[in-house]
Amino acid sequence: MIQVWINGKEWQVPEGLTMIQAMWYTGHEVIHGIGCLGGVCGACAAVYRMPGNFRLFNALACQTLVKEGMAFSLIASYPTQRAHYDIEQIPDAKEGLFTLYPESATCRNCNACTEVCPQGIDVRTSVWQAAFGDFKGVAETTMSCVMCGLCVSRCIAEMAPHEIALYARRAYASRELAFPENLRQRMDSVASGAYDKELERLSRLSPDQLKLECGVK
């Protein structure tokens, strides 16, 4: 067993648990902020400190193991001004960025967003790439972004870098990236009814039969 502090209260938990598992073990009813539990959805952003170290660390609670003396808390989702748009209807994607997210031009170059990212993304660079219309660069830089929003919590310009990156990636996919041929072939197959009989067969199976079909014991 190891000693940890969760939301300021001391607990003893088994070594080897993730932050989320430690919260479950100690009776916390963690519902909001739980998604994939695999480090993909970004819904469990957390902050923690270690004894003898002044630094405030950031992590995804579903994939970060607790350690002796760790003090941590989950972070509620930060409110953002999420723009609503049809990327196909925007004539000029670069100008569209400044219309929908005018704050994207106000980056102070402080790099706090990069420091807080649990995925190690160079967030500051992605914001500058977006502002200069390098949407391909944004897509490559933010490939591992899970939309946790921790960057929002530190931005002194009060922008939402992950939303700006999402816009840029959509613009890149819409305007510059060729439509994947293998995806087009699969969509055509689905539309032609090639999988209708198999889908009908699967829909008739019981839950136990579906588990057997998927190799789940």
Image (cartoon, rainbow, N blue to C red):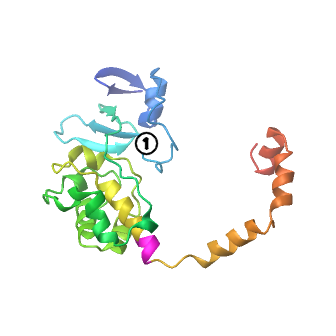
Magenta segment boundaries in residue numbering: 172-176
Look at the numbered disc 1 and give the secondary structure of its residue. Answer: loop
Depth order, front residue of 18/13:
18
Is residue 171 highlighted in magenta?
no
Residue at horizontal 36 percent and vertical 66 percent from the top? 168
Quadrant in which the N terminus is drawn: top left
In this rendering, position of residue 179 left or right of residue 73: right
| Closer to the camera in the image, 1 or 191 | 191
Residue drawn at point x = 34 percent, y = 34 percent: 76
38 relative to 190, above or below: above
Does residue 54 appear anywhere in the picture? Answer: yes
| Image location of residue 81, percent across then percent down | 31, 47
Q: Residue at x 30, y 74 (%)?
A: 134
Magenta region, main secondary structure? helix
Q: Position of residue 111 (x, y in %)?
A: 18, 57
Judge from the rendering whether residue 26 lies leftward or rightward of residue 157; answer left or right: right
**Which residue is under mark 1?**
43
Identify the image quadrant of the C terminus.
top right
Nearer to me, 128 or 141? 128
The percent coordinates of residue 211 (x first, y second) are 77, 44
Q: Amino acid at mark 1?
A: Ala
- The answer to whether any part of residue 120 appears in the image is no
- Vertical position of residue 43 compared to residue 161: above or below: above
> Is the residue 66 above or below the residue 3 in the image?
below
- Local crowd size for mark 1, using a 10 Å CA cut-off: few (<14), some (14–19), many (≥20): many
Q: Is residue 205 left or right of residue 94?
A: right
Total marks drawn? 1
Identify which residue, 205 or 213, lies in the foreground: 205
Q: Is residue 100 above or below residue 53?
A: below
The quarter of the displayed image where residue 140 is located = bottom left
Residue 161: x and y in percent read: 29, 55
